[in-house]
Image (cartoon, rainbow, N blue to C red):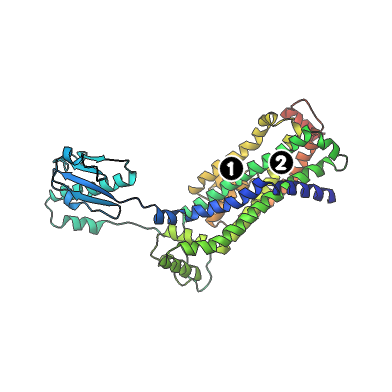
Amino acid sequence: MNKIGIIIAREFNERVRKKTFIITTILTPILMLGLMAAPTLMMLFAKGDSKTLLVVDESQIIAPQLKGNDELEFRLSDLSLEQARTDESVFGVLWIGKDVVDNPSNAKLYTNSSSSMTLEENISSQIEAVIESERLKRYDIADLEQILKDVEVNVMLTTFRNDVSSVEGEAEEATSSVVSYLLGLVLGLMLYMFLIMYGSMVMTSVIEEKGSRIIDVLVSSATPFQLMMGKILGVASVAVTQIAIWGVLICGVSSILMPALMPDDMAQTISAVQSGAMTTTEADIDADMLSALNFASDTGSLVMMFVWLLLFLVGGFLFYSAMFAAIGSAVDSVQDSSQLQTPIMIPIILALIISMSVSNDPNSGLVFWGSIIPFTSPIVMMTRIPFDIPTWEIILSLVLLYISVVAMAWLAGKIYRVGIFMHGKKPSLKELISWIKQ
């Protein structure tokens, strides 16, 4: 164990001291927090310049009912279309034909500079509303517009969990499947990225040491299994360090940044929901938005999510990196490893595909077994955890994963101890199996 510890320290120090590690460790939380703050910042700073449109309305119906805002001003004009288009002091000209009510496409926008999708949608929606109103008048039904407004309804379904017991004296809280799915998908993608990135790092390191014959010297002081486990655990400690730093930064900064970015009334609502003074149904905010803000500002939930992420990251990495190390020992170059990597990449890609179906049913048979079988469980289980699945399923998945890590390390070690001394020939899968049997 002392020799393995020396190898772990060497692998850890070699990677942690690199500038790329420092830069990515610092920049990634900043980018993630920037994405969290992006919607608020866009609302504050994404307003465009004020624009003026001359409206030439031959129908005399649409123009009087157009409403401007801080970014767009409608100015009625008695000029002809040709004359109005020569005015370069305005943003453009909106021309509306006489038969626009019967022919809604008989409206055209002429601009003196680049237009925008938001502006065009604003104009189109206003014209559509006026045309619909004019067409309704033809039915000659008294108060028809008011009747339509009275029957118009927007259902906001609030979901509660019967199988999740609440603390006595506290109100039940609503859940959001949209927020749970998006959060799970992000966590699953993070694990997918880490398994491939750090697993490939282990394989590349083994190939480089084997090619330079450094490993021939190292085996005089440590066994091949000690070298393999030291390298795997060393790289794993780098991944854990990076995730832990991200967790501390994101949890710490979000608890300060999120309340500062939220309006005072929304911050008070979130605080009331977290303290139990108000339920999510009583808060006059969209359920999905409230659930997302509530989770982002709840440090305890964020910390617990990072704990699960670390556990599945370590287990998944140890499981797959053992296979990557075995492949690295069996070949002489990165190019030769591409074919042997395929059996490893297929379960990882399959896990990501299964994760996409979590939105349909997080408790379906496919998703459940995908989160239990060690080959896919790290990624699939992380996409299920935000849905508040039973804790015993998470524990079972972790136990099976770490038991499989021991078995996979034993199998990979048998390949590794033979492969590091083989040069000049890329082994087939049949030969790898024969090495295991030796």
Look at the picture and state if 344 lies above or below 395: above
Gap in angstroms between the C-alphas marked 2 and 1: 21 Å
User: Residue 140 at what x, y percent from top left?
Assistant: 11, 52
User: Residue 193 at what x, y percent from top left?
Assistant: 60, 44
Residue 336 seen by the camera: yes
Q: In the figure, residue 158 lies in which quadrant?
A: bottom left
User: Residue 203 at what x, y percent from top left?
Assistant: 71, 38
- The residue lying at 82 percent from left, 32 percent from top is 421
Name the residue carrying label 1. Answer: 351
* First in sequence: mark 2 vs mark 1: 2
Extreme right residue here?
Answer: 220
Left or right, 345 with reference to 219: left
Q: Secondary structure at mark 1?
A: helix
Find residue 202 and name its label.
Answer: 2
Q: In the figure, residue 391 lies in which quadrant?
A: bottom right
Extreme bottom residue here?
Answer: 169
